[in-house]
Amino acid sequence: MSAYDGDAAHWRRAATERLAALAKPPGSLGVLEDWAITLCVAQRTLAPTAEPATVVVFAGDHGAKLADESLSPYPASATQAVFRALAAGVSCTATLARAANAQLVVVDVGVAGDLSRVEGVGDVVVEHRKVARGTADFRSGDAMDDDALAAALRAGGDALTAAAARGAVCVAVGEVGIGNTTAAAALLAALTGEDAAVCCGRGTGLDDQGLAHKVDTVRRALAFHGAGLAPREALRRLGGFEIAAMVGAYAAARAAGVVTLVDGSISAVAALCARKMFPESRDRMLFAAALAEEPGAAAGGAILARELAAKPALDMALRLGEASGAVLALPLARSAAALLGAGTLAEAMALSDA
């Protein structure tokens, strides 16, 4: 056991004992107690905090979608529109971030258009870390080469580290990229060996014909690239720049001293990839939203929950992405941190005896 693991075990044990002593039935606060333990282990204290918080949204486009608009009801150009709305502070996620008292950071890692002149409005931070203008079409080639993957991983890690340098101790991680549910489904199938049909959902509203086409697209990509891909190779061949950046962000969390909040299904696929590539990222993840966000994705969500041993805090039929579920869970993280300061059973009994 490494010194780090030994120290982590100490704080996990101490936090567990503290929670067991509180004036409540053991385990009665469920996932909130798990979150409290994660915060204690990450911060090496029995008085953790979940503030300040930052929301980081990575944006990128996908070659398969750029080549085949039928993969999503929305045009590929919508990625740029959403990015601009986030940067301007007028999107739903921007509104939720303000309500949660969290700074919003929007990162261009692979949007197809030129966003170099887009700046954040108000307290929104825009970071230009573009690797390329969208990935290549993964149906007939690799989504990215080795250098591009390394750059995307580095961009995610640097964005997370920059957020920590600005004071963040909790970072909600999310994405925007029209068509990225297709890439995420392909990556999930490659990482788990599951069939494409159970990994695909309806995304932003595909009908039956559109869903069938999506499944066929994923199967075609998997057949082209072959089975048994190592996690890094699967990410390189099938992933998106925003997905790779999230992997890099999760991987950097321990060194940066922060805890990450994982959004929904796409963020969770990135989390699964991160755990396989960087096992040390495991103890810095809080799963915020249900892992089957999109309609028809219950089977894929169940696979993710099993593979990640995840118990998401929220099940609210969320399917926006953009870190929206992770933002909504930030108050829960604050509650988890505060929980350690609650009175013990012994203290409560002393009050009743007084």
Image (cartoon, rainbow, N blue to C red):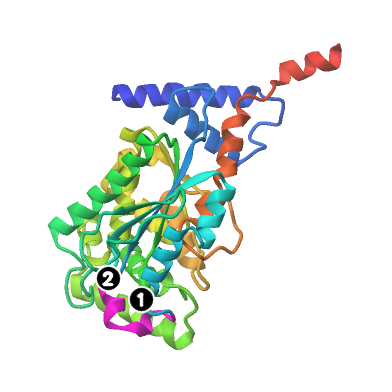
Q: Is residue 167 above or below residue 325?
A: above
Mark 2 residue crowding within 10 angstroms, few (<14) / some (14–19) / many (20+):
many
Residue 327 shows up from this direction: yes
Q: Position of residue 75 (x, y in %)?
A: 38, 80
Q: Which residue is mark 2?
A: 112
Residue 66 colored in magenta in the image: yes
The amino acid type, in three-letter code, at marker 1 is Ser
Q: Is residue 339 left or right of residue 47?
A: right
| Secondary structure at numbered mark 1 | loop
Residue nearest the observer in this picture, 40 or 49: 49
Q: Position of residue 114 (x, y in %)?
A: 26, 68
Q: Position of residue 69 (x, y in %)?
A: 34, 83
Of callouts 2 and 1, which one flags the residue occurring earlier in the amino acid sequence?
Answer: 1
Which corner quadrant of the image does residue 194 belong to?
bottom left
Give the main secondary structure of the magenta stretch: helix
The residue that appears at 47% across and 76% down in the rendered structure is: 202
Which corner quadrant of the image does residue 230 belong to?
bottom left
Which mark identifies residue 144? Answer: none
The residue that appears at 35% across and 45% down in the rendered structure is: 250
Contact, mark 2 vs mark 1 (Cβ under 8 Å)? yes
Mark 1 residue crowding within 10 angstroms, few (<14) / some (14–19) / many (20+):
some
Q: Position of residue 46 (x, y in %)?
A: 53, 22
Residue 175 colored in magenta in the image: no
Point out the stretch of residues depicted in magenta.
62-73
The residue that appears at 67% across and 37% down in the rendered structure is: 28
| Secondary structure at numbered mark 2 | loop
Where does the N terminus fall, quadrant-wise? top left
Residue nearest the observer in this picture, 35 or 49: 49
Where does the C terminus fall, quadrant-wise? top right
Q: Which residue is mark 1?
A: 77
Residue 289 shows up from this direction: no
